Amino acid sequence: MRAMIFQQIVNEDAGCIAYLIGCGQAGEALVVDPGRDRVDDYVAWARRKGLSLTHIVETHIHADHLSGNQALAAKTGARIHIHPAAEAAYPHAPMDHGDEITVGTVRIRAIHTPGHTPDSICLLVTDLSRGEEPWFLLTGDTLFVGDVGRPDFGGEGAAATLYESLRTRVLTLPDSVEVYPAHGAGSSCGRAMSSKPGSTIGFERRFNPALQAKTADDFVRALMTGLPPKPPGFDRIIARNRSQALPSSGDPEPLSVAQVREAMAKGAVVLDARSPAEYGEGHIPGAVNVWIESNPFAARVAMMTPPDSRFVLVATGPSDLTRAAQGLGRAGMDDIAGYLQRGMTDWKSLGLPEARVPQITVHDLATMREEQPELVVVDVREPSEWDDGHIAGAINVPMGQAIERRNEIPADRPKAVLCAGGLRSSSVISALLRSGVSGWYNVAGGMREWSRAGYPTVKSGESQSGA
């Protein structure tokens, strides 16, 4: 019986993936890329498998979530390993190109693959109990299933470096080597990541669009073209992940209506984590709506709220509150004043002002476009989604740019906002309502329902009268 233990631990709310690799015979294991909100889970998983955590490895300094490496090390005594280029300020053992960690019969070798970040490494894993042939590669954010990492931190120069890392250190591996990345669908660290949990070098070599470039120039051009703006908060999270970790602030406290109003008067942002329909039916004026089921939740909150915001949470129930607090904490947004006790019930019972956003169907939208020529259709999807098909005459203002480009949206005309399904559109409406722009309709079901209902669309470059 082989001794190797391999566990992929997916955080579906953020698209983040951690890994537990161990040797049952030795009773030891390591964790790769742990998230701060799952530390107890890693300890519990290892305990259930009879393993002691001895090592923690980071494939790079993460920009989209706070690492749990220091908290996990404090709980287990495990040693943290990270590449020297990360310039980490906490105690750790540097892990450079070619360095190895052995856990029983399992060998983990670092391959330095700069590009996404200067410190990026991949981890080549071999189960020595079955031979010297490498089994799989943990690719961090260097190579995803169906995509490659964003070169956000060095532009074209970093993209060229990534090309060399892939060409000389990743794609030289045998086709049979399995590929397991640090992020999957829903993460903001790539553009077209698959929801598949893994792949192989051979499959990615053949089918990954980002790997089809014949030259470095072609690769850089393709990678940099249409690259979405760097999500807000990335630089702040990187700084936090380099530094000594601060203790968690704990669970948010329940707040009365009076306490919520006091917090708002001092600048706190009400974050309404309910569905767009519930938010639209009635919400605290000025609240920002990001449904807890939005993916990625924390990244969307960061897009729609000012940096370093202090939050008051509104949610449907205790489990949603817990998920919201964990999601915010994962992205370093720890400043939570508390949550509105009993949700909107007390607010409504006191007769306090509520704001509303009409929710309309795609059929309503089709009728309104005919009857109200002054109606503006605002599409907040990404340019690639827009290019694949949009409503003739609509304007495209992607979600992440909506606040800074709000002057492009006519303030004095009625506005119907849509995305793929109605979540991003509600978030954009809430943020622009907060900035003082009114006259909104949220299109429930978005472009999916519009297309499913057979209404006409055009693609970029086609005539605006096309179907």
Image (cartoon, rainbow, N blue to C red):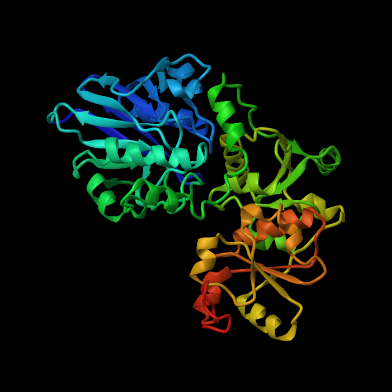
Q: Please name the residue shown 69% across and 85% down the image.
A: 370
Q: Nearer the viewer, residue 234 or 342?
A: 234
Is residue 147 among what the camera can see? no
Relative horizontal placement of residue 410, taking residue 274 as reference (left or right): right
Seen in the picture, residue 123 relative to 352 is either above or below; the reply is above
The quadrant of the picture occupied by the N terminus is top left
Q: Nearer the viewer, residue 73 or 318?
A: 73
How far from the left and from the top, in percent, is residue 174? 18, 41
How far from the left and from the top, in percent, is residue 356? 77, 63
Q: Please name the residue shown 19% across and 33% down the image.
A: 134
How far from the left and from the top, in percent, is residue 57? 39, 25
Q: Nearer the viewer, residue 465 or 345?
A: 465
Seen in the picture, residue 284 relative to 412 is either above or below; the reply is above
Seen in the picture, residue 63 relative to 29 is either above or below; the reply is below
Relative horizontal placement of residue 44, taking residue 311 as reference (left or right): left
Is residue 172 among what the camera can see? yes
